[in-house]
Structure formats: C-alpha cells, structure tokens
Image (cartoon, helix red, strand yellow):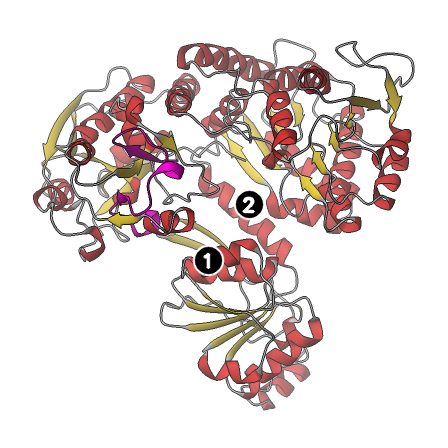
Amino acid sequence: MPAEHPQNPESQNKKQDRPLWAGSPEPAPYLPLAIDVSSLRCLIVGGGKVASRKTETLLQAGADITVVAPEAREDLKVLARRKKIDWIKGKYRPELLRQCDLVVAATSDSKLNIRIGNDGRRLKKLHCVVSSVPNSQIIFPALYKRGSLTVAVHSNGENCRYSKAIRNRIASLIDDPHPGTSKMVMFGFRTSSPDIGRRTLQSLHKYEKKLFRDNPAQNELLILSTCCRWECYIAGRSARHISRRVLDGIKKHAGPEIGTALMADVRHLAGHNLYFHLLKTCLGLNSYLIGETEIVSQVRRALNRWVDSESPELYKTFSSALLAAKKIRRSSSLDSARTSWAENTTELIARTAVEPGDGPVLVVGKGKLSGEMIPKLTDSGYKVVSFSRHDAGKGRSENGSLPVLHTDRLGEYIEAASALIICSELTPTAVDALARCNLSGRPVIDLEGYAEMLEESNPKARIYSAADVPQQSISPTDAENIASANYMALRQALIWHSLHNPLRAPDDAVRVGARKSRLSRTQVQEIEGLLGGFAENIQLENVFFHAPCDRDRKTPLTEVKEGDFFTRDLDLALLAGQIDLAVHSAKDLPERLHPQLSLAATLPTMAPWDCLVSKDNTPLTFLPEGATVATSSLRRRENLACLRPDLRPVDVRGDVPHRLEQLEEGRFDALIVAAVAMIRLGLADRITEIFPEKTFQTTPGQGSLALVVRQSDTELLNFLKPLDIAGGEC
C-alpha cells in the first residue's frame, strides 16, 4: 500500500535508460509483491536492533538466514544457539555475498551499508540498505496479519514510522468488529516500547496537562498514565472524532519525530474489546507484575481526576470494571501478597548481590510505592536515604520513618550508594548529576522511564526497568488463579457486550463438535460457559469424534506430514452438516482451512506458559544429568537444550492423562506440557514448575481456543463474532 509520489516525466525517462541493476539516486516507486522466501538464502550484516527486526521478519517467513557481525544482541545469539540462524562472528567480506540471494545491510555505519548495497548490485543480488533507501532494491513493509489476511504498508521507504502508524490504524479497523455501535474508544501503548523514552514521556505529560486544562470533551476523556502504560479513553458519540483530535494534538505538541514514534506504537480498542482490556488492567493481568494491586488505586485516581460526575458513560464503564475486578479477584483468589512492587523490588536488590553493609540505598519518591518499599528495605537491614522534589526537608517519607532530602541533592550521595531506586520524577539537577556520575557496579532500578537517558552516559551500568522487577516465579497455584481470573474477565466482558448490544441466539440448536479426549470435552464446557454469558437462551448439543491424532498414537509428531492431523474428522463433519461449530486448540489448526470453512473466533489464552511435571516433583534444575524429559515438540526441545543441554529429550504421544500415566510407569523422568492443559483438567497440583516466558518461549496461540464454522453459515458467524476478542494487552 505505497504512498503516492508525483513523478517528473523527464526524470521518469532518465530512469528508463538505467540498467536494471544500476540503482537510482532517488527512491524508486517500489512494487508491493508477496513472495515465498522459504528457499531464499539471506545474509544480514549487523548485530543490532535493526538487524534483529529484519531477522525476525525473515525467520517468520521461513528464510535461511546468516548473520554477519563481530558482536550481536542477545536475542540473535539465542537464535544462533538454537540453530535457527547461522552467525558468522566477524566483519563483512564481499565474498560472503556469493552464497546468498538477498543481502540486508543493517549496520550502524551508513557508509558500510551503502558499500554492501553496491556490492550486492554488482553481483546481481537482491539488496536492502536500511540507512539509504536510494541504494535499496527491496524494502520491508509494515505488516499486519490476521488469519489468512496480510496487510502490507510502505511509504516508498521514506518514513517507516508513518507506515507503521497507517498499518496500526488499518489493524484497528479490522480488530473492531462493531465500529458503528462503539460509544467508547481508547488508544494507548506500553511505555516500555523502544521508541518511548523519558523525553517522550515528558512531552506526553506536558500535553496531558494541556488536555486537562483545555479538555475538549468534559467528562468524556480520561488518561491513565503509569510506569507501564499511557492510555487515553474517550466516550460519547464523537469519541472517534475526538480521538483523532487528541492524536493530532500529540503529534503537534510533542513534535513530528516523537509524535510519529508514538503513532507507530499506538493501538486502538473499542466496544467489549476495550472493556476486556480495562478489566484485565484493573486486575493487574496486563502488568509486568501479574495481579498487582497498585493499579487499582491508579485507575481510581485517574477516574476522579478526569470525571467529576457519576452520570457519564466513562464513569459508569470504569466503575463497572473496578467493581467486576474486585469480585473476580475474590472469586479467583488472585494473591495480592506475592504481587507487591515493593516486595519484588527489595528482592531484586538482594539478587543483585547488594549487601546491607555496602552503602545506603537511595530511594527517589515520597508516594505510596516508596512508602511501602522503604520499610521492607530497612527490615532487611539496608540503610535508606529518601529523596523527593516536593516538600523536601519539611516532612518525612510516606511511612514517617525517614527525613526526606530534596532530589537536587542526589548527586551528593550517589558515589557512596550501593543502589538507586527511582520511583518518582527526577529534577533536571538530579538528571545532570547522574549523567556525570559513574553508575557502574551499583544497580539502578528505574520505574520512571529514565533508562535510555542513563544508559547513554553509563553504558556499562546495571539498569533495570519496570519489566525487569518481577522476580518471584509463578507457582502452580498462581497460574491456576491467573487462568481463572482471565476466564472470568472474558466472560464478564461478553456479558457487558450483551447488555450494550443484545444478540439473538440461533433458533435451532447449535451442534458443537470436538475430539473425544477429556481435555477437548473440558474446552467445550469452557465455550458453553462463555456463550451462556451473553446468550442465555442458546441451545447447544455436543458431538464428539476421534481425530487421526487419536487413532495414531505411535508416529512422532515431528514425522507427521498431514496439516489436518488434529482437525480432519471435525472438518469433514462440518462439511457434511453433522455439526455446526468445531472447537479446537488454536495451535492445532492447519495453515490453511478448507475453502468452505471459516475461522469464526480465536479466544485469548488463559495461561500462556509451559510447565514441568516430574515423578518426584523434582524441578528442572535438580533433575540428574542424563534424565529423560518427554515432549513431542521441537520448540520445547530447543528450550530445554538451552536450559539443560545435559538432559535427554524423548518423544511422547497421547493425551495429557495418558502421558501422565506413562510418567508414573517410569518411561521417562519428567514431562513438559502446556500449563493451561493441566489447569483445565484440574491437575494443577501435579505441576512441578511453571517456566517463565522469558526463558521458555511458547507456541503462538498456546492455550487459545479456535472456533470453526461453515463459511456459508453467516448467521452463526455473526453470532460468534463477540468471542473473537482481543488479548487485552495494549
């Protein structure tokens, strides 16, 4: 979807006289094409962030990738260790191009990139120069994928951020199933995005103050700003128009560069997608620290600040979400004791090898968070010095235990400090002092977005952002409670949708098909509970089938060639009219559905993690060398090899209960399965260990359910649309 650029006829004639591989001093009008790159040999020169992004894009498309760089980012090193890519640790050499079909020049040296592009042109290789569009034969568009649909947007290589912004706006139109009926919209982003540093946040906060002063929609606009997110909610008939005005205002107030960066990361939600996101936010399920309770007071403060009446739609929606979240926390037993930022920050300080006698811990902030943190630090034996830019010298910290110094004096104490925790905004004097100081050797925990600025002056400093603070592992009980809260939030969002957009259930009974396994039957019950939430009068009949995977329990999954190995019998039953709706695990769907079938909905996952189940409840770390670990997944084997290369993976087949029986019989020492499967079967107490997503990557769609119907059944397709809900993250 290239942007239009008027051409000079004279320059067009000159371009026609150029040889095909001669390049052009101006960006050529690139033709968007979709190509199969699965057999393409790609050489990526560079080991930084841009090279990482290009690698990820090409890897997802199945390309054969070699990275050339003296040093590389950690994610590229991980891919190399897992044999996903080849890494030549060294400098670029022109002879490397002879073994590739496509070269991407993605180094930090623009002159070297241009030289690589010229070498590629000379050798007639496809070439992309990231820092010089005129020297590129191909460019990478901004992509959006949903099912079989792919949207590609480029601006002829002139403005990548603008292309991303347009891509995101198109995506928001596709993601919002009821644009005409939405009375409320929101847009926002996580403040941990690489494009959103402290300077950007400061510009946002200035614009936020201007909005509050000159509110274009009194009682119809609310901004929720925390260390993890910046979100704008707008209600009323003119919600979409006002959201465009606010977005334009951000670009105008923050400047074109910052504004374009924000637009590239923004995501829009509306209707019950918005309510589901808000509900998960109030539950702490969208936070880095899952289940945190601090977010509740932050949402309440934002509501009280921006809305001064109980009648507006905004107040009703937020109040409804806060009340529903309170009930869900109680019903799901989300444990607030393990979800304290103060507790996790204190534990992080201890894990960074800071001892109580090493020097004082400096805490910037005089609010609730620092007030909870200081007693935990002092109880652990640390000496604490507290700072604030407000009322310094006139009061004490929130808990009343320490005098508070002005933040301007931070530089006087930093050299002798053992650690620094930033919980509140720094003064310019404090920022300058930190820029001049050597922060190496002491941890800096930054909850206010200064990491980028601090790393510029202290590249070797140990700086931790909000995303790094959560330290406590998720226990099986935690995982069960989180899954329960996610399910209740989804059901509540569907109920909320039915109140605002009543739907009529199909007149005839809907025949629901699934596999005969115990897990599949449980998943059908889950869907029945959700459908009953927004259509109480719906009639459902269950029909269960064996699939090829149930009849053949011997062939290793790595040797299975059929794409419909898990779905074939259900597909045939749909086509024959024996059932109306098939319930699948989303990860089991083939790449392409039968042309007469349609994916009606993909539900968000309730628990995305993998887990270990061992016979004697022995964690992965303590399994003996050479122990056998059963898994049928190549990805899980790769993850296992990275964590414990001395263990021996073995194949396993059968449903989860059958695999557990094999474990008890001693056929292997441990088993890796999806945590959500154990939870759905009521077997969470059998889980030995939950693997964090950071170290044990899971399959996209793991834990999600997919609903498939006949393409011709438009009534059922429309009825199931509300279930195709966004994941709730922004």
Q: Secondary structure beneath disc 1?
A: helix
Q: Do the residues labelled 1 and 2 touch (CB within 8 Å)?
A: no
The picture places residue 580, in percent across and down from the top left corner, at 17, 34
Q: Which contiguous range is marked in magenta?
A: 609-636
Closest to the observer, 91 or 385: 385
Q: Residue visible at 22% across and 25% down?
A: 522
Closest to the observer, 656 or 614: 614
Q: What residue is pinned by disc 1? A: 79
Tell me if 204 is positioned left or right of 179 in this view: right
- Name the kind of residue labelled 1 in the image: Leu
Q: What residue is pinned by disc 2? A: 169
**Which image quarter holds the C terminus?**
top right
Label for residue 153?
none
The picture places residue 139, in percent across and down from the top left corner, at 55, 68
- Which numbered disc flags the more N-terminal residue, 1 or 2? 1
Q: Examine the structure image and report whether residue 308 is included in the region drawn in magenta.
A: no
Q: Is residue 217 above or below residue 83?
A: above
Tell me if 48 is positioned left or right of 396 in this view: left
Q: What is the CA distance from the residue labelled 1 to the residue labelled 2?
A: 32 Å
Density class for disc 1 (Cα within 10 Å; few <14, some 14-19, many ≥20) is some
Q: Nearer the viewer, mark 1 or mark 2?
A: 1
The picture places residue 175, in percent across and down from the top left corner, at 45, 39
Q: Write down the quadrant of residue 578 in the picture.
A: top left
Q: Secondary structure beneath disc 2?
A: helix
Q: Is residue 360 above or below residue 569?
A: above
Tell me if 473 is positioned left or right of 361 in this view: left
Q: Residue visible at 12% across and 32% down?
A: 516
Density class for disc 2 (Cα within 10 Å; few <14, some 14-19, many ≥20) is some
Q: Examine the structure image and report whether residue 621 is included in the region drawn in magenta.
A: yes
Q: Residue visible at 42% across and 21% down?
A: 489
